[in-house]
Image (cartoon, rainbow, N blue to C red):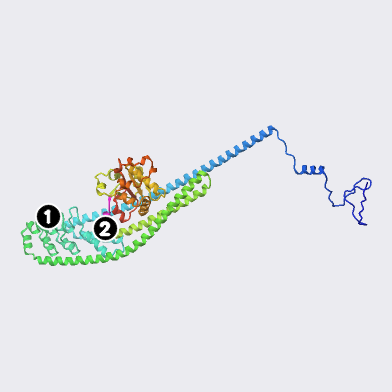
Amino acid sequence: AVESTQSTGGRGAPTTAGKPAAGGKPVANKAGSKPAPAKGKAGAKTAAKKKEPAKPKWSKEEEGAAVKIQAAFRQHKQRKEEAEARKKKEEMDKLMEEAERQAWLQIVKMEQEKADKEHQIWLAQERERKESLKRVKMMLENAFDGELADIQQIMREAREGWSKKEPDMHPVKLSRKTAELLDCIDANDNTPLSEAAAGGASEVIEWLTGEGANPNTVGRYGRTPLYRAAFGGHVGAVQTLLQCGGDPRIKADDGASPMDIATNPTIKEIFREWDIADTERLLENLQLEKDKRATEQADYVKMKMDTLSDQLLAAEDIYKTFEKQLIRAHQELNKRITEHDECVGKGTHVEVTLQSVHDAEDLVTELKVKVEDSRKELQMIRLKIREEKKMEAEQQVGVTVTVRELEDVLIRDVGNKIAEDGRWPLLIDETGQASIFVRYSDTNYLNALNPGDMEPQRIRIGLLGAVRYGKPLVVDLMGVDMFHIVKERFDEIKEGLLDWVLDKTLVTEEKFNQITKPEDGPEYEEKMFWARMGDFKFWLLTNAEPEPALLEMFYVIRIKPSPPK
């Protein structure tokens, strides 16, 4: 039956969409209306098919081909990654090689500059030494020959040279250097005044004593200028010397006085008639003049020392500040190198860590220059202090050898100098050669600036090995004042351990057993040590002048460069 399309709502009510009209034909939808959704199971299946398309079924041949394609792709990808890794490694190797080459060139350049500078210093010192020897020789020869004008010219040129080298030289210092030249000596300890007396040069004697030369110096065999003048029969020289303060009572080593050896009757008569009270008066005046010069010298030294002491304190503060920064920079560099090595192994962040290494190296290089400059300034001030105290460089503590002589001096101890001294050697080596020598010798070497070397366990094993096999334990301070830090690291193993090493009581059974451990293994068992314990040695190495306290604690060996050809 066909239902009515009219609703009971009255005129104008809409018809139901999709309902068939009379005659079985559906009524068309109005414009813009959507078709009614399909109803029933058939409609649901159609909707499902549209939402979930059916998966294609692969044949076995297709599946096998897909597996092969995937495997080939993975292999290709792996080869590509490996090629990229190899290329990256090659690039990194080239960068490292170039960095090492540049670093090596920089080191070579620095060493060349240092060697050139040392060579220039050596040449300047040699020129000064030769000029000084030549000046002394000419003073002595001209004094004997009575060439007063030449002697005065030598003194004048010497003063001009000193003033040119040190324009602000204090008058007291100039006076002291003048006095040293006036009383210079030859191989027989004879002064120019003594040579003038031997040559009978009365005019030269009078001028030299007037300039402050000592009339009573004692030369070879205990002979004074007056003795030599009397022995030579020089009447005028004897009279001049007596009037200038020559003491006729001073006897030579053979017990003879100037009068005893005089063969000239006139000279004997002069001695007999001479009033010794005049000698006493002249000597008193000479002593007053000497005391006056000594007082002036003392005042000058005090003034100079006060100034230098202030400069020394300031220079020490600067040096220690840079030194601490250098120690931290070395530690930081070692960390950066370790990080870089780890990243190279993993293949990650290599460029970043390499740059960090370069930055750390640059900082270390910069601080090394600052430490070296501040150290030189400090050494220069100390040198000035030694000069003011009349402590010349030749009076430095220790023996001086070349690196080629270390085999005999250090290792074999030819002459038993080190054994008789009783202290361990301290090698002061500004050439850098001794460090190479000891590392290539049979030693246990520890770098004080390397945190790994300063680990207590590393120190303990190095010390045990040196005692066990009877060889030296070497601690290289690398020119940094950190002996106190080394002592602290030793004390972390056992309180007072470094003191035991220094006083050589470590090799006693009582103390040695306190640093061994059961886990050290059979190689370090107690019974393995006693055969060679007596051969154990301890060497301290540095490439800069250390603190005075270390010079007293060790037997000092200074390494000098071979004279340049």
Give whichever of discs 2 and 1 has the lower sequence position. Answer: 1
Q: Residue at x 91, y 46 (%)?
A: 25
- Residue at the top extreme? 61
Which numbered tag is attached to residue 354? none
Relative vertical location of residue 169 with respect to residue 540 in this rendering, above or below: below
Q: Position of residue 130 (x, y in %)?
A: 26, 53
Give the residue type that dot 2 points to.
Met
Q: Residue at x 10, y 54 (%)?
A: 254
User: Does 25 sit left or right of 148 as displayed?
Assistant: right
Density class for disc 1 (Cα within 10 Å; few <14, some 14-19, many ≥20) is few
What is the quadrant of residue 208 in the picture?
Answer: bottom left
The reply to whether residue 375 is visible in this rendering is yes
Frontmost residue, 124 versus 538: 538
Density class for disc 2 (Cα within 10 Å; few <14, some 14-19, many ≥20) is few
**Label 1, on which residue?**
253
Q: Residue at x 26, y 66 (%)?
A: 299
Residue 519 falls inside the magenta stretch: no
**Label 2, on which residue?**
391
User: Does 555 sit left or right of 64 as displayed?
Assistant: left
User: Does 68 sit left or right of 511 as displayed?
Assistant: right
Q: Position of residue 183 (x, y in %)?
A: 20, 59
Instruction: Provide the residue span drawn in magenta.
Output: 392-399
